[in-house]
Image (tube, helix red, strand yellow):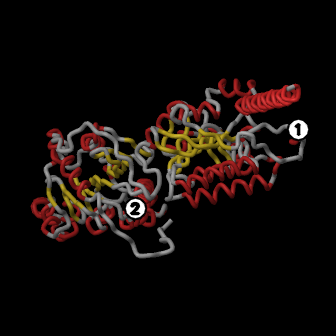
Amino acid sequence: MPLAWALLAVVCRKFYMGICVMKDILSELEDRRSAARLGGGQRRIDAQHGRGKLTARERIELLLDEGSFEEFDMFVSHRCTDFGMEEQKPAGDGVITGWGTINGRMVYVFSQDFTVFGGSLSATHAQKICKIQDMAIQNGAPIIGLNDSGGARIQEGVDSLAGYAEVFQRNIMASGVVPQISVIMGPCAGGAVYSPAMTDFIFMVKDTSYMFVTGPDVVKTVTNEVVTAEELGGASTHTKKSSVADAAFENDVEALAEVRRLVDFLPLNNREKPPVRPFFDEPGRIEDSLDTLIPANPNSPYDMKELIAKVADEGDFYEIQEDYAKNIITGFIRLEGQTVGVVANQPMVLAGCLDIDSSRKAARFVRFCDCFEIPILTLVDVPGFLPGTSQEYGGVIKHGAKLLFAYGEATVPKVTVITRKAYGGAYDVMASKHLRGDFNYAWPTAEIAVMGAKGATEIIHRADLGDAEKIAAHTADYEDRFANPFVAAERGFIDEVIQPKSTRRRVSRAFASLRGKSLKNPWKKHDNIPL
């Protein structure tokens, strides 16, 4: 009996010791987690808040569904031993990585932590980002990068440069495979800008974020130009002048909310269809107001966004690059709950002419839609390409060809509606039947011709230029014969002349009929689009 009691005592002691050890381990785990969550410390967190910025973790919490974030590599630290770096080894090494959900759909995310070495990229920092990029490609889910970094970590030298290149390579491999979204929420300078530049969408935050290859000090030293960081690479610069960024928002909270909204329009990868959302709008809705949208004067402008809103489910339109090249409109709507990309000429700006900037903007958007099986609706009112030496010297020929190429290459369902003018080469470029348009509609107000009546008349009847009455008669005759959609319809270039008020119904039915479309281009390694 004494022996049994002794054995029991030993077992109890070991059990108790095991409990104590487990408690110690769990306590250490919680301590380590708490330290990692603090990043660079409370003082730096307060400084971040003082600049009107959220911390890296707060951003993730706002971006993802509550409680969905699963973190990777929380305890990873850098391996640098130069310049006293071995004495500073914060957990996480300046970037938070992992996965979570947005409205129940999986995404991978990394968020750079400016409180840790200014968010600078080290070899291990890069490895963490590369890890989730690889996982996103393998598992078919979008990658969202929240960038807030001073650039390469100088103490690590070439190791940090190698890290950037590893990230770049994965950006390239992920392109067209999974959607990539970059949100610039602080500085982004030097080589760091090239990773966002290769992603599908770039959002910025006004007044707190900027992007440039070389900063203001270097610019002053090399070129003697005096420029502020905001002027050089701020949100306004990149949304209005350079087209690097797709949109800019007032603060971190708004930017992250808009990312959530964008993700709702996109498929998870290139092998999935875009999501279908519940809709509360009648597909056959008639909009009588559209019958009077086109002004009586053919030179008067109107707002194409009104047509987009009246075609879309619940009038919901998510515009891309709203502040750049306003003569063309790009963005996403839903029809019967399904995502559709929209490209539309805007008659209120430059009369809707195509130019260098609008061609590049629209071409990139069309190629994105084609990558991810998003159908394209094209609304056409284009008097031609913008004339002038600045356009020709800037390469409008090559840039215009980009849009032509993008439409001709696209295999997704394509529906086109010509509302008013479709003149010259611009008619061809804007998703014409000749570029494998599936449904090409025209309103009764459509004018499909080589050029406007007056210009055409002056060329055809040059001998009568001195006689105003004859020229007027010739112009009227030309308008009667060509300033309508019926000549093109007679040749089968227009499938149907439709009533403006029935546009939503006809377009919705067209896309519904194309859901099973299957079209493949000839095999090639890749194309050679004119860059």
Judged from this view, the residue extending furthest toward the front is 1
Could you say where residue 451 lies in the image, as x and y percent from the top left?
Answer: 24, 63
Which residue lies at the image location 28% right of the left edge and 62% below the top edge? 427
Residue 63 visible in this rendered orientation of the protein:
yes
Which residue lies at the image location 20% right of the left edge and 49% below the top edge? 298
Is 274 positioned to the left or the right of 214 in the image?
Answer: left
Is 351 positioned to the left or the right of 140 in the image?
Answer: left
Q: Residues within 10 Å of mark 2 (few under 14, many from 20)?
A: many
Q: Quadrant of residue 7?
A: top right
Front-most of residues 427 and 490: 490
Front-most of residues 111 and 386: 111
Residue type, label 1: Glu
Residue 87, label in figure: 1
Q: Secondary structure at mark 2?
A: helix
Which residue lies at the image location 84% right of the left edge and 47% below the top edge? 80
Residue type, label 2: Leu
Q: From what the image shows, is residue 83 above or below residue 376?
A: above
Residue 403, label in figure: 2
Q: Residues within 10 Å of mark 1 (few under 14, many from 20)?
A: few
Could you say where residue 151 lies in the image, as x and y percent from the top left?
Answer: 71, 46
Q: Earlier in the sequence, mark 2 or mark 1?
A: 1
